[in-house]
Image (cartoon, helix red, strand yellow):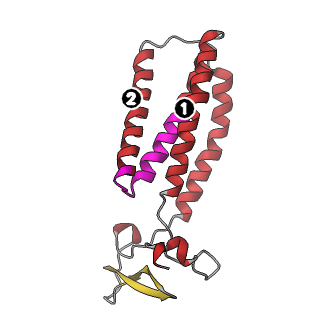
Amino acid sequence: MVGLAPLWRGWAATWQVEPSPQKQSTEPPWRGGERKIRSSWLGMALVGAGIGMAPWLFVLAAGLPSTTVASHWSTAWVGLDGAEALGLITTGTLLSLKDPRRCLAAAATATLLVADAWFDVTTAAPGSDRETAAAMAACPEIPLSILCAVLALRALPRRAVPLPHSGRYPSRRRFCARPHAF
């Protein structure tokens, strides 16, 4: 069992997770015994997977045809644009409700908008189609993705634990639930 204990620093209390005084579990951490997240091995595995994709990018660049016919082309685009619309609606709704999960919706929506702008421009035919795709990317898609990315970063939960390797706590004003109380 894990409990929350107040840590008083100045005028504000911050909360940190403390293990309960019960006997220690012999279960491995991934089964919920200690509640410690050991992400260093997972982080290294993800970095390795990203580096391992580099040769695959060269294989794709050399082996893919320059043109192709997709039988469900319109379905793919309608699905992508529908996901963007759903992401914008979800982000706006969660933002209006001040729900902390808005950072997840905003990050996903920003990613979808950037991907749509990229594929719109790179798959458009030369001429007026490419100009239209570039205008759509420059006007609504990229600015909306930047807005969603900023919303995602601003909505991230604040730290209530010491900064890594410093032993210092972040400033009160930045991490207090009610900064106007100071």
Q: Identify the mark at residue 82; answer none if there is no mark.
A: 2
Q: Which residue is rendered at x = 56% and y = 24% of the image?
A: 136
Magenta span has 108? yes
Q: Which residue is mark 1?
A: 141
Q: Quadrant of the N terminus?
A: bottom left
Indicate which disc, 2 or 1, sits on the residue closer to the N terminus: 2
- Residue 179 on image: x %, y %: 48, 73
Neighbour class for label 1 at 10 Å: few (<14), some, many (≥20)?
many
Question: Is any part of residue 90 visible from this angle?
Answer: yes
Comparing 26 with 138, the one in front is 138
Q: Is residue 153 left or right of residue 105?
A: right
- When asked about the image quadrant of residue 45, the answer is bottom right
Comparing 3 with 62, the one in front is 3
Amino acid at pointer 1: Glu
- Residue 3 on image: x %, y %: 34, 81
- Residue 26 on image: x %, y %: 35, 79
Amino acid at pointer 2: Gly
Comparing 46 with 115, the one in front is 115
Q: CA distance from mark 2 to mark 1?
A: 14 Å
Question: Is any part of residue 121 visible from this angle?
Answer: no
Q: Secondary structure at mark 2?
A: helix
